[in-house]
Image (tube, rainbow, N blue to C red):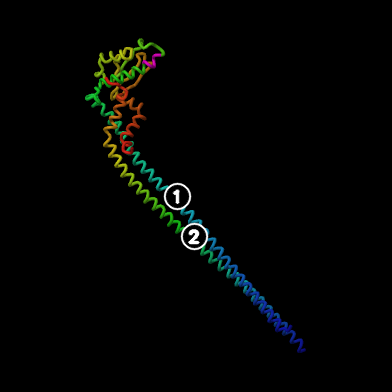
Amino acid sequence: MNLRVMAVEALKEIKKAEEEARKLVEEAKEEAAGMVREAENELKELEAEASEDMERRAKEIADKYAKEGEDEGEAILREAKEEAEKLRAIAESRLENAVEAVLVRILGLNKQAGR
Amino acid sequence: MGASELVERIKEEAKEEQERILREARAQVEELVKNAKADIEERKKRFIEAESRKAAENKERIIRAKRLDAKKFRWDVEEKAIKRAFEEALKRVQRVKEEGFRGKSYPGILAGLIKDAALSITAGSERSSSSSELELEVVLSAEDAQFVTGEMLKEISGEVGCEVRLSKERIKTVGGVIVRRSDGRIEVNNTFEERMKRLYPGLREDIVKVLFRAREE
């Protein structure tokens, strides 16, 4: 009788231990799944931050290059305007020569031997 | 093995299993994060490189457009100066009629144009008829008709070998002449407007040389 009781008690303890072991493993699995979920959520946030960062940096780069282009372009235009103004003055000073060159040809004086 | 030993064994195995699961999970998370971060950094790098290329191309596009505008400044100046030289030349014709040009009188200039035109017509007519049978007429504006005398036409007739006479027809022109065969089959238009049109490419080159090239040479 005593032996049977002891055996039953031993079996109960083993069953209990098995149940606790199963529970421990289940909890570990849940905890592991939680760790992965948490990491995935963090990565989503990281992804969103990276997207924002990329957009911001892309805008900075585009603005920087556009400004450089505008600055260089303006310098080219300024120089061209000055050059054009000089050219206009030179052309104006030589207009008389050009008019004469046209007249020589349209009056036919480049071919006439003299009359 | 006793029951208590068995219980301990079950507990130990469960503990080991728990640690294994958590260890693997941590390793999995670590790998996941490491790969994801590397992937994000790589994408960031490629994105920034692509955006930098786009931005650099845009910069070049802006500069190219400005260079084109800069060329237009020079082109505008050149075109206006060329146009002005042509306009001034036509305006100057009136003064040429009064004062002559480079030592030549206006009647002398007209005579030269008549002779050149007449020679062109006679040269073109030689194959079909003899020059002596040809009769040419000179058409001018009412203003220019007064500069042409019978003596001048007689002299030209002698030089070109056919009769050249003054037409009664008058035309509107700044100056110059039209010479044509009396039968109307050949005509040479030596009015200044027409000569300007005909000679335009060469004249334009001359003007460009005079106005702009001398400076650069």
1 vs 2, front mark: 1
Q: Label 2 amino acid? A: Ser
Whether residue B150 sits left or right of residue B132 in the image: it is: left
Q: Is residue A18 visible?
A: yes
Location of residue B98 with respect to B14 vertically, above or below: above
Q: Is residue B142 in view from this perspective?
A: no
Occupied quadrant, residue B3: bottom right
Does B42 appear above or below B105? below
Secondary structure of residue under mark 1: helix
Q: Residue B57 has which mark?
A: 1
User: Which residues lie in the magenta part?
Assistant: B122-126
Residue B81: image location, x then y, percent: 30, 36
Residue that sits furthest to the left in the current view: B99
Label 2, secondary structure: give it. helix
Q: Residue at x 60, y 67 (%)?
A: B28
Tell me which residue sits at (29%, 42%) in the image.
Answer: A86
Q: Judge whether A44 appears above or below B198 on screen.
A: below
Q: Measured from the top left, where is residue B112 in percent x and y? A: 29, 20
Q: Chain of mark 1?
A: B
Which residue lies under the disc numbered 2?
A51
Q: Crowding at label 2, few (<14), some or many (≥20) Cα neighbours within 10 Å?
A: some
